């Protein structure tokens, strides 16, 4: 394993997919991306800026998100504590931050920064998760 200022490890997940685990300053980020066949999200590094926790990534659009079951070119991201991933959507977890990303004019590879938390003091030394999903129909 190569060591830089940040370590990148790989953990196996269900269905044989790999979830990148990205660590910095005692905080880990698991990326849960069932759209990986269409949209690859590669972590570059995490940083704290003022009160924000930011995950800088490179996003590669491999094919239309419609081929991965999405109804639009918008994808949704949600950040939360990794321990809450199982309960998300069932009322037993809450998101730290969420938003939509438009892929309509994006082609190939481009940098994208995800705001994981607007209160970095509350998530420092916690394992976080970034979930990528299709945006529900409006």
Image (cartoon, rainbow, N blue to C red):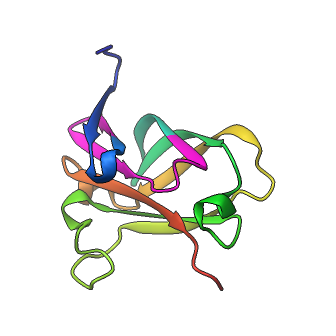
Q: Give the image location of residue 16, x and y in percent.
A: 32, 45
Look at 52% across and 40% down and name the residue there: 57
- The residue at 65%/59% (across/down) is 67
Q: Position of residue 46 (x, y in %)?
A: 41, 39
**Which range is magenta?**
20-41
Residue 138 position in % (x across, y down): 66, 86
For residue 137, above or below residue 64: below
Judge whether 36 appears above or below 43 on screen.
below
Q: Is residue 116 left or right of residue 69?
A: left
Q: Quadrant of residue 89?
A: bottom left
Q: Which residue is pictured at 61% across the width and 50% down the height?
A: 38
Extreme-right residue of the structure = 105
Looking at the image, the residue that sits furthest to the top is 2
In the image, 13 versus 55, the foreground residue is 13
Q: Quadrant of residue 23?
A: top left
Quick check: 43 left or right of 136? left
Quadrant containing the N terminus is top left
Q: Position of residue 22 (x, y in %)?
A: 33, 37
Q: Is residue 116 magenta?
A: no
Question: In the picture shown, does residue 28 fall above or below 138?
Answer: above
Closer to the camera in the image, 117 or 105? 105
Chief secondary structure of the magenta span?
Answer: strand
């Amino acid at each position: 394993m190569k060591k830089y200022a940040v370590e990148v490890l790989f953990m196996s997940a269900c269905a044989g997919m790999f979830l990148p685990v990205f660590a910095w300053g005692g905080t880990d980020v698991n990326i849960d991306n069932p759209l990986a066949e269409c949209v690859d999200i590669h972590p570059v590094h995490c940083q704290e800026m003022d009160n924000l926790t930011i995950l800088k990534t490179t996003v590669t659009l491999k094919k239309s998100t419609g081929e991965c079951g999405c109804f639009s070119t918008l994808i949704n991201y949600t950040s939360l504590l990794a321990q809450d991933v199982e309960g998300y959507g069932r009322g037993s977890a809450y998101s730290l931050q969420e938003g939509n990303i438009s892929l309509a004019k994006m082609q190939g590879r481009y940098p994208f920064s995800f705001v994981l938390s607007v209160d970095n003091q509350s998530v420092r030394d916690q394992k976080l998760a970034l979930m990528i999903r299709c945006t529900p129909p409006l």
